[in-house]
Amino acid sequence: MQQVMEIGEDILKKKLLFKLGTGDNQFERSVYLTLIRGRKNCLIDTGTAGNFDNIVNFCRENGVTVADLDLIGRGRDAGYPAPHRSVQAVLPHLMLCSS
């Protein structure tokens, strides 16, 4: 993961690189995780299910545990499992939204 960019007060963004596919058919993709901290904490654009540990670490490094998240927003559904489902299984109060 790259360095965290502070977009505004309590708005943090970090580029996460990951691979999709298997064997010789792998390709690199990226997603920008955005964490908005405040009275309610929001994580935007989580990428694929394989990013879960990186997301947990990004939040923790910035003073927010996964249990502190109130909302996860994600971009278009690209047809692959996303880590927000893993979080929602543990935190049923979590609100999910998609574009």
Image: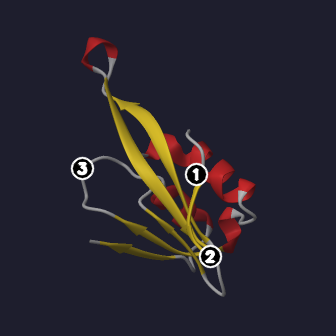
Q: Position of residue 5 (x, y in %)?
A: 56, 56
The local secondary structure at tag 1 comes to helix
Residue 69 spot, x, y in % from top left = 62, 72
Q: Which mark is residue 79?
A: 3
Relative placement, left or right, of 51 versus 24 is: right
Quadrant housing residue 26: top left
How many other residues sit within 10 Å of disc 3, few (<14), some (14-19) or many (≥20)? few
The one nearer the camera, 31 or 68, is 31
Q: Is residue 42 above or below residue 75?
A: below
Sequence-wise, the earlier of marks 3 and 2 is 2
Residue occupied by mark 1: 55
Residue at position x 28%, y 12% from top? 24
Answer whether residue 18 is visible to the viewer in this image: yes
As measured in the structure, the alpha-carbon distance from the residue carrying label 2 to the one carrying label 1 is 20 Å
Where in the figure is residue 12, as x and y percent of width and height? 57, 63
Category of crowding for the residue at label 1, using alpha-carbon neighbours closer than 10 angstroms: few (below 14), some (14–19), many (at least 20):
many
Mark 3 residue element: loop
Extreme-top residue of the structure: 24
Residue at 41% across / 60% down in the picture? 45
Mark 2 belongs to which amino acid? Glu
Residue 9's label in the rendered image is: 2
Q: Nearer the viewer, mark 2 or mark 1?
A: 2
User: Disc 1 or disc 3, which is closer to the eye?
Assistant: 1
Calculate the distance from the C-alpha at mark 3 to the C-alpha at mark 2: 33 Å
- Visible in this render: residue 47? no
Sequence-wise first label, 2 or 1: 2
Does residue 42 lie above or below 74 as drawn?
below
90 on left or right of 78:
right
As measured in the structure, the alpha-carbon distance from the residue carrying label 1 to the one carrying label 3 is 20 Å
Quadrant of the frame with the C terminus: bottom left
